[in-house]
Image (cartoon, rainbow, N blue to C red):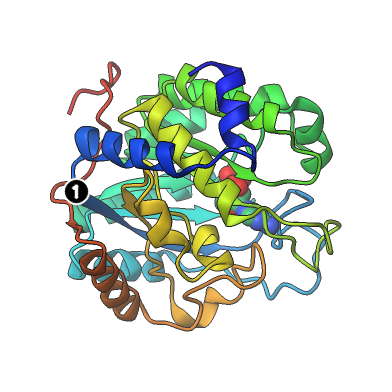
Amino acid sequence: MKKEELVKALSQDTDPAPFFAEADRVRREEMGDGVHLRGLIEFSNHCRRRCYYCGIRAGNAKVRRYRLTPAQILDCARTAARLDYKTIVMQSGEDNHWGPRQLADIVAEVKRETGLAITLSVGEHTKEDYKLLRAAGADRFLLRFETSDRRLFSMLKPDSDYDNRFRCLAWLKEAGFQVGSGVMAGLPGQTLESMADDILLFRQLELDMVGIGPFIANPDTPMAGAVGGTLDLGLRMVALTRIVTRNTHIPATTAMGSIDPQGRQKALRCGANVLMPNISPKEHRVDYSLYPGKICTNEAPEQCAGCVDAMLVSLGRRRASGYGHTLKSIEASPR
Ligand code: SAH
């Protein structure tokens, strides 16, 4: 699809039903009916950055900060293995407490103990640090570029650099990670043109995974009171990303489920093939408060697993087997 076609498809004036059906067809053809479950461990909400949209930004005094111990992280990973998840995603703010060496040690231990696939989502680091984490046994890395609009990016992330974000994505690939990126949909000032560019960039970067969620204004950030993204826009982005990138792993994100009780189900029906059930300890879930209304903050890991399995049954889908590694070819690290 060309940029103009994408802009048109993203517009509210276009009926999305035909391309939602097309995205569902491409998903079935390329990825099958299996849905990969990735257990999400939010292991620290300390962050050195001040991203305007994010609830755990540095300086937000309302956040009760926490950091799981290595033993707690390992415990979460064991829970994931017990629930028969094949991947854990370790996500955090950019927490200075963890040096790359320490983080690598935890990754290595989790890998040794559980054998699970490990995805990291820990922000911007040096090329050397990425290599270290990869060598320790991390398989994948998620780093959303958030928006392809350079001006909007620098407004939203005052202490990050647009070019460095993309440099990090290149370094991750070089280090042999399966690389995921993504954006928020419906940011203030974000145009349909820039969202069409986001989608074209997903293809150009040959990403293995793409996560898309609606922007949800957080009252404890400088963006308090801003108009958020809609489910409709998020779904259009998911569907078009599926059509354009074909065999990328695309999650039905928590943010989708947070703005609409059927959000994740709808995403799974127009292109998504991954779910990321939360396996963080219950007592800390409310504190990983990226945005208000986040779902599953009151549940234990087992409850999320039951809920997700029931969701799959209701959609006529099933858990996928295997680790759910990338379907794109990886040169740096054959599996
Ligand atoms: N510190 C890591 C992990 C970030 S949290 C990093 O920077 O990569 C994961 C994602 O949550 C972010 O990439 C962002 O896209 C999303 N997010 C943060 N605040 C949000 C908000 N208010 N609404 C919707 N999504 C948000």
Locate the C terminus by quadrant. top left
Residue 173 in percent (x, y) is at 42, 23
Q: Quadrant of residue 284?
A: bottom right
Q: Residue at x 44, y 44 (%)?
A: 17
x and y percent of residue 184 in the render? 62, 45
| Rendering coords of residue 195 (x, y %) | 63, 32
Is 120 situated above or below 335? below
Residue 128 falls left or right of residue 196:
left
Q: Residue at x 75, y 34 (%)?
A: 153
Task: From the viewer's side, name the closer residue of 27 and 72.
Answer: 27
Instruction: Please tell me which residue lies in front, 332 or 108.
Output: 332
Q: Label 1, secondary structure: give it.
A: loop
| Image point (33%, 28%), residue name | 246
Residue, disc 1: 33
Q: Is residue 3 visible?
A: yes
In the displayed structure, does residue 275 sit left or right of residue 80?
right
Crowding at dot 1, Cα within 10 Å, few <14 / some 14-19 / many 20+, comes out as some
Q: Quadrant of residue 286?
A: bottom right
Would you say the beta carbon of the disc 1 residue lies within 8 angstroms of ligand 1?
no
- Reply above or below: 185 against 127: below
User: Can residue 178 be spotted in the picture?
Assistant: no
> Amino acid type of disc 1?
Asp
Between residue 101 and residue 184, name the one nearer to us: 184
